[in-house]
Image (cartoon, helix red, strand yellow):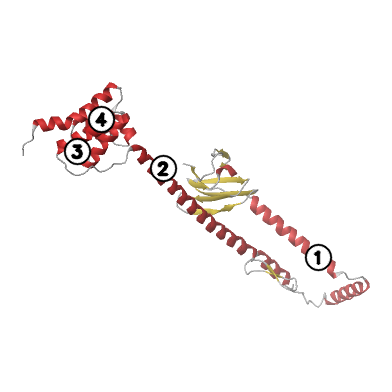
Amino acid sequence: MSTDPNKTNEVSQPCQLLKAEREKRGITTKQIADVLNLPERFIIFLEAGEFSKLPGATFTRGYIRNYAKYLELTNIDELVGTFDACVGNDATDTRVLDFKQIKRIKSISNSIYWLVSFVVCLILAGIVFLIWQHFVNSNTNQTIPSENGAIIVEPGSTASTVLQEQNTIPVISTDSSTLPLALNNTTQLATDNALSPVNTDKDAVSETNIQDQSEQNDANAQENAKPSLKKGEGLIEANFKANCWVSITDATGKVLVSKLFTANTHLNISGKAPLDVVLGAPSAVSMSYNGEPVQLNQTSNSTHRIKLGK
C-alpha cells in the first residue's frame, strides 16, 4: 500500500504549525506534556506527524485541540479539520476533555478517596475501642468480691498461694518429755486470753490493709521495672500525654503490643530488633530506644511508622 506524499505533508502541516509556535515562545515539549498531563513522547510523536504511535484518531484530535488552546491559537477548528481531512476519518468529532476538566475530575476522585479513607479510619477506631474496652473489663473481672466480703481468687494466683500457706496447720511434737511443759504453757495462755479484751475485728482490718498495701507495692514495682535485655534485643520506653494507638512488631513478626494508650500512661517493652513501631498520634508520644530519645513528627496527627534498631 503506497502513501501519497502530498497527503503526508498535509497531515504534518498542523503539527508543524504547533511545533513552530511552541519553539517561537521558547516552550519545551516537557512543559507541554506536563500541562496536558501526557507523556512527553506523545508530544514528540504529535509534532513529528507519527500518529500511528498515538492511541487513536479521536485522542490525537483532542491532543491537537488542547495543544492549540494552550498556545492560544485562534484557528483551532481549522487545525483539527485539516487533520480530519488528511487522515480520511469521516466520523464526527468526539469531544475530548481538556486538561482543566481532567484536573477537575482528578480533584473529585481525590475527595472521594479521602472521604472513604476517613470512614474506614472511623470504623477501625471503633473496633479498636471495643477491643480495648473488652480487655479492660476482662482484667477487672479477674478478682470479684463475694457477698460476705471474701475475695474470690483464681487458681494459680499469688493470693491463692498465700491463702494455702496461711491454712497450713503446723505439726506439734508430742514428745513425752515436753508434753507437761506445753500443757502448762497452753493453760497459762488460755488464762491470759480470757482476762484480756478481744478485738478480732480490728486485727482483721489491719491484716487486710497490710495485704492490700503489699499487693499495690508489688504491682507498682512490676509496672515500673524495665525488662532485662538479651543480645540483639531493643528496649522501647514511651510516655503518653494524650490517647494514642500503638502497634509494635519485632524482627520475627511477633506483635509485642497492639492497643490504645491513654493520657498519663507509660510503656516499657523489649523485643528482637529491629522493632517496627506504628503510632496513631505521634504528637501525643515521647519515646526513647535503648535510652536514646527518638525523634518523632510532633506536628503530625496522622499515622506515623518508624523502624528502630536497624
Measure the alpha-carbon separation of dots 4 and 3: 25 Å
Question: Is 204 displayed left or right of 272 in the figure?
Answer: right
Task: List x then y, in percent, for residue 83.
Answer: 19, 35
* Residue 205 numbered tag: 1
Q: Which residue is mark 2?
A: 107
Q: Which residue is mark 3?
A: 53
Disc 2 secondary structure class? helix
Outermost residue to the left? 1
The 10 Å Cα crowd at callout 3, few under 14, some 14 to 19, many 20 or more, is few
Q: Earlier in the sequence, mark 2 or mark 3?
A: 3
Q: Earlier in the sequence, mark 1 or mark 2?
A: 2
Q: Earlier in the sequence, mark 4 or mark 1?
A: 4
Determine contact: label 3, label 1, CB under 8 Å: no
Disc 4 secondary structure class? loop
Measure the alpha-carbon separation of dots 1 and 2: 70 Å
- Image quarter (top left, top right, bottom left or bottom right) of the N terminus: top left
Q: Which residue is mark 4?
A: 75
The 10 Å Cα crowd at callout 2, few under 14, some 14 to 19, many 20 or more, is few
Q: Is residue 136 above or below residue 35?
A: below
Q: Quadrant of residue 142?
A: bottom right
Q: Amino acid at mark 1?
A: Val
